[in-house]
Amino acid sequence: MLQGFTRKFPPLTYLTDEEVESIHRGALFVLQKTGMRIEHEGALRLLAENGCQVDFDLQRARIPPHLAEECRRKVPGHFILRAGDREKDLMVGGDAVYFMQGMGMRYVDLDTWETRSADSAEHRDAMIVADALENTHLADAWEIYTDREGIPPVMALLENLASGIRFCSKAQVAGNIRDTEIFAIKMAQAVDIDLLPEIEHASPLTIQASGVEAAFRYMDADIPITPGLGPAMGGQGPASIAGSVLLQVAETMGWAVVTRLHKPGGPIAIHQGAGPIDMRTGIAIWTGPATTISTVMMNQMLREYQIPIWSNAGFASNSKKIDFQAGFEKSTGTLMSALSGGHLHLYQGGSSSELLYSPELAVMEDDVARSIGRVLEGPDVTDETLAIDVINQVGPIPGHYLGHAHTREWWQKENCFLQVADNEPYSTWVTSGKKDMLSHAKEKAEEILATHKPIPLTEEQETGIEEVLNEAREYYRNRGMISDEDWADYVQALEIMN
Amino acid sequence: MGYESSRRWDRTPTSALEALTVAIREVCDAFGAGECFLPELVGAAEAMQNAMPILEAEIKERGEKRHSAGVVVAGTVFGDIHNIGKTILCTLLTADGFEVIDLGIDVPVDRFVTSVKEHQPHVLAMSALLTITAQEQKNVIEALKGEGLRDGVTIIVGGGAISDHFAESIGADGYDPTAPGGVRLARELLQS
């Protein structure tokens, strides 16, 4: 059975056909006139061989419209992401809508709201909770708690991925800082799953050597990639929403060209989500009306191109707490993206400008995801649901529907029952301790940790993961990227972990 | 436009520079008071940055000396491609009278070290948005120690993943979460 939700009505759109064409034509013009800076010799050679005007000194490739058009058409509209548990495989594309575990660098104390490094047990617990949440379809072990106690930063991402694979049987996000992709690929191969790596991209109009290298490595291993666009509007992109969309469309086609020339059939999703800079402070605002409008427009453009979409419209509020601001900003952005055709939504559990991750927030936002999914599925309009005969049978008051067979048949199907939302009568709420949604979420997370058992890896898979980690540890030690002092702390942390 | 334009206004290059400095400080004050915003501030600072080479050349030709608040080398550390915060800091430092050498983003340790050797800055400013890359700031500080350069430069750090505690733990001299605060910090540390 396919995971996730299906949007059963046409996606919300802003743009007229003429506006879509203006953005598309403008992006082609930028690619030809200004081009992109691509800091990778091999990619530049490929571009030159295929008709681009390349300045190797400036690392600039000007891309002709015909090549950009041809390449973006070749991007597959769908791809499969294989999970550890094959029942949880995803088919990305079309009208499918998925929600992803959010990202956040540090653990947050729910009493003081201060953040700190997370230990291995906290990462494990976060992944077990994500494994249990029904509406979290793609896991992001890679990007939660990147600040790990006792673990050298260069190993944190890989230790995170290993923890994710061990304790969550869903498909996993990955990435590409400092050659980590080499070991992420090996880990995925050791357990025979797919990853969805976010590849670094530097707006405006720049792809770094490490990004190209990682993209090619993942593609060579038949792993889909997702270039991470998302300019800060007014800084890395134009302050106007349409301009920021046009820039991202140009960058999308730039990536389509680079990746098609390397491997024509290799699947990609575009990770998009421009947000404005608050020019009073310099802080980027990643959720809010401008981001949402930009997201809806980008979703429309990418659907026009039939390129799968990763949306960031609700990934992080700037609120430092799990509060009303975080709730409304994240949920409205995610809802609007889902309504307008986004496929993958970075969402459950992350907030505070990427600084915090909370399993309790993930539990609450899993309810939001369930609600959005229900809205996407829309109404069922048939003779039976129109209930004309039932309405005629019941008639006016004192008639009612409570005891009717139609009610027994439909009340559960039509509703959406949430796990931790408070729908108790007032008196029950008072007598049961006046709990709010966060209190319920804490209890739910505790219950999951006490009862949920992730599918264990086989011995062979476990050995494979550990071998890859050992290889990575040696690789980074030999390159001086783990100091002796850090290594001593790391060994101690590993002993505690085991 | 060259220096001839200011010559027409009967200004010496030093007084033209002073006038620009006064103007930019007014813009900075207005930014601090919420009366203007980053685009105005950065636009004004870029105007000053464009004027500087012209005025500096003329000052040098006349054998005069320019007053500088100090030399700063700045960059986003290796593995990190986040640009905006560092760029705002560089702009504000320039506006505040510092001479800034901006090394850009994804700057490896050895480039920081080479640049400190070459420019002998008063301040080294490093940015890192991610917890994964924040450790690079420590690596740079250790490398500077190894080269015997650490004591000759004041080191300030910033970025989304940085805290006071972290800055202290890696041996930086100071941390501020905002670019305007970073400028104040640089000034205070140089005066102390």
Image (cartoon, rainbow, N blue to C red):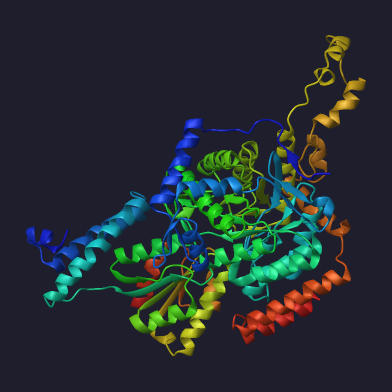
Determine which quarter of the picture holds residue A184: bottom right
Residue at (56% x, 64% y) in the render: A211
**What is the quadrant of the C terminus of chain A in the image?**
bottom right
Residue shown at 39% from the left, 53% from the top: A34
x and y percentages locating residue A427 in the rendered image: 81, 36
Is A409 drawn above or below residue A266 in the view shown? above
> Is B151 located above or below residue A253 in the figure?
below
Number of numbered discs overlaid on the protein picture: 0
Whether residue A475 is visible, yes or no, is yes
| Front-lying residue, A21 or B192 | A21
x%, y% of residue B186?
A: 38, 72
Res A279 visible: no
Q: Residue A369 placed where, x, y %?
A: 72, 43
Between residue A495 and residue A234, name the one nearer to us: A234
Q: Is residue A313 above or below residue A17?
A: below
Q: Is residue A168 left or right of residue A114?
A: right
Q: From the viewer's perspective, is A39 left or right of A129?
A: left
Image location of residue B99, percent across then percent down: 30, 71
